[in-house]
Image: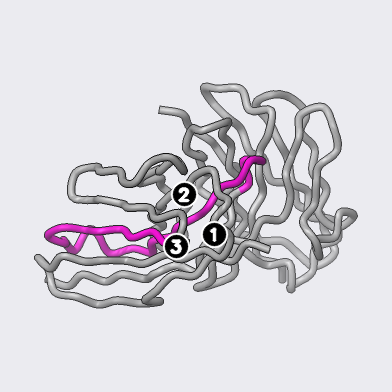
Amino acid sequence: GAVVSQHPSWVICKSGTSVKIECRSLDFQATTMFWYRQFPKQSLMLMATSNEGSKATYEQGVEKDKFLINHASLTLSTLTVTSAHPEDSSFYICSAGTGNQPQHFGDGTRLSIL
Amino acid sequence: KQEVTQIPAALSVPEGENLVLNCSFTDSAIYNLQWFRQDPGKGLTSLLLIQSSQREQTSGRLNASLDKSSGRSTLYIAASQPGDSATYLCAVGGNTDKLIFGTGTRLQVFP
């Protein structure tokens, strides 16, 4: 079945650094990918829609300058958390899918900012 | 704005019980509804996808129903097992492929 790979699975870094998370669709082309954020014991919150070849569409309240999204190809989208601070610590998950097919999710990235 | 709610928020049952998890959504204009399973610290595994024109989907011990007009879906788990312990999330999809997730039900099945 379709697989979405997310890397890294866990990252710890100092406050003020930027962190890049990759989301790859391994066996299908994804013109659209989605980025979600999940706080402990809470549900997933959609952050933005990543569109291949064009700018991402951000949900209300999500800072586009803080969370940079690049959809470089039909199989790769990246999320860069710029100048990360402790409040950015969270679990970030990407997904990809088209039309009436189930969305496929990556295994998530746990980001811890010290 | 679409809002998705799941009841109960948490559930603890002995092995072997049949379970019903509930999902409700405020805007009935959906394209599909999907049920997912999430293990602690992990991503999501898709369990069942119901298109808006469908009433139910079945996979093994799982059965999901959809009543679009009333804004409800249920996930039925037959003969629960300890391995079913996880968080179950429902999500509704519109015409943009975006998913709006419910609040989740944390299930624990004890031996």
Q: How crowded is mark 1: few (under 14 residues within 10 Å), some or many (20 or more)?
A: many
Q: Quadrant of the C terminus of chain A?
A: bottom right
Q: Which residue was labeled with disc 2?
A: B33
Please give the chain letter of the residue carrying mark 3.
B
| B26 or B47: nearer the viewer | B26
Mark 2 or 1, nearer chain start: 2
Residue drawn at 19 percent across, 64 percent down: B82
Please give the chain letter of the residue carrying mark 1.
B
Task: Decide whether residue B97 is among the magenta residues.
Answer: yes
Q: Which residue was labeled with disc 1?
A: B101
Determine the secondary structure under disc 3.
loop
Q: Which residue was labeled with disc 3?
A: B70
Determine the secondary structure under disc 1.
strand
| B69 or B65: nearer the viewer | B69
Above or below for A105 versus A85: above
Do residues under tags 2 and 1 come within 8 Å of each other at their CB atoms? Answer: no
Instruction: Tell me the mark number nearer the camera, choosing from 3 and 2.
Output: 3
Residue drawn at 57 percent across, 61 percent down: A44
The boundaries of the magenta stretch are: B72-98
Residue drawn at 73 percent across, 67 percent down: A88
